[in-house]
Image: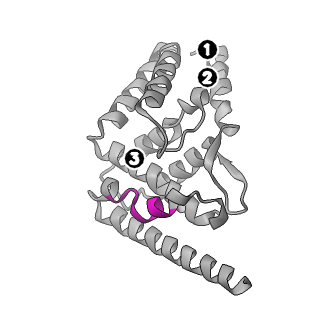
Amino acid sequence: MNAREFLEILHVAEKLKDTPRHCTTSKGRTESVAEHSWRISLMAMLLRHEFPEVNIDKVVDMCLIHDLGECFTGDIPTFVKTDSDRKVEDDLLSKWVKAMPQEVSADISALYREMDEQKTPEAKLYKSLDKLEALIQHNESPLKTWSENEYDLNMKYAFDTVAYSEWLTGLREEILKDTINKIETEKELCNNKQ
C-alpha cells in the first residue's frame, strides 16, 4: 500500500468521527460512532487476561472496523435497522473494501467474514462487547435522553449474546444492576422535585 492509498482509507474512516450515534455521553452530548468503536476496542484490550485463550489483538481489530459501513449510511439504531438497511450498508462497505490495496482488502474481508459467521471465540467476544458497550453508554447517559423502548432494551438486550461466557454473563448482570439503580434513582429524584 502506498502513502496515498493509506491516506484515502483514513479520509473515509474519518467520517466516523462526525457520524452521530443514537446514544449520548454522560454529559448529554451525542456520541460518535468512532467513540463507540474506540471504547469497545479498549474493552477488548482490558479483557486480555480474562480471556487468555482468545486472540485479543484480532478482537481489537474487529472492534476497530466493525462499524466502518456507517461511514456511508450513518448509524441506524439496532431497534429500527431493517434487513434492507443492512444490505445497503454491507454493499457499500464491500465495494469500498474491495477497492483497497489487495493485502488490506484481504485482511479486512477475512475479519468481516469471521465476524459475520460468529463461530470463533474472537467473533463472539467482539459481538458481545459491541452490544454491552451500548448498554453501558446508555447507563452513563442522562435518562431523559432514553427513548421509551430503551428501558426494556437495557433490561433484556444481549443476555443471549453473552450466554456462552460466565464472565460476560456476570458483566451483563452488573450492567443490569446499574440500569435498575439508574432508573430508580432518577425517578426518585424526579418525584422529590414535584
- Above or below — where is 114 with respect to 158? above
Percent from the top left, x then y, of residue 138? 57, 60
Name the residue that disc number 1 marks: 2
Q: Is residue 142 visible?
A: no
Earlier-in-chain disc, 2 versus 3: 2
Q: Nearer the viewer, residue 20 or 38?
A: 20
* Residue highlighted by disc 3: 127
Farthest residue, direction front: 194
> Can residue 168 be seen at all in this image of the molecule?
yes
Q: Is residue 45 above or below residue 78?
A: below
Q: Quadrant of residue 49?
A: bottom left
Q: Label 2, on which residue? A: 9
Quarter assignment of residue 58: top left
Q: Residues within 10 Å of mark 2 (few under 14, many from 20)?
A: some
Which residue is found at the position 44% from the left and 27% from the top?
84
The percent position of residue 141, horizontal first and vertical second, equals: 63, 62
10 Å neighbourhood of mark 1: few (<14), some, or many (≥20)? few
Q: Marks 1 and 3, Cα distance to the nearest angstrom?
A: 32 Å
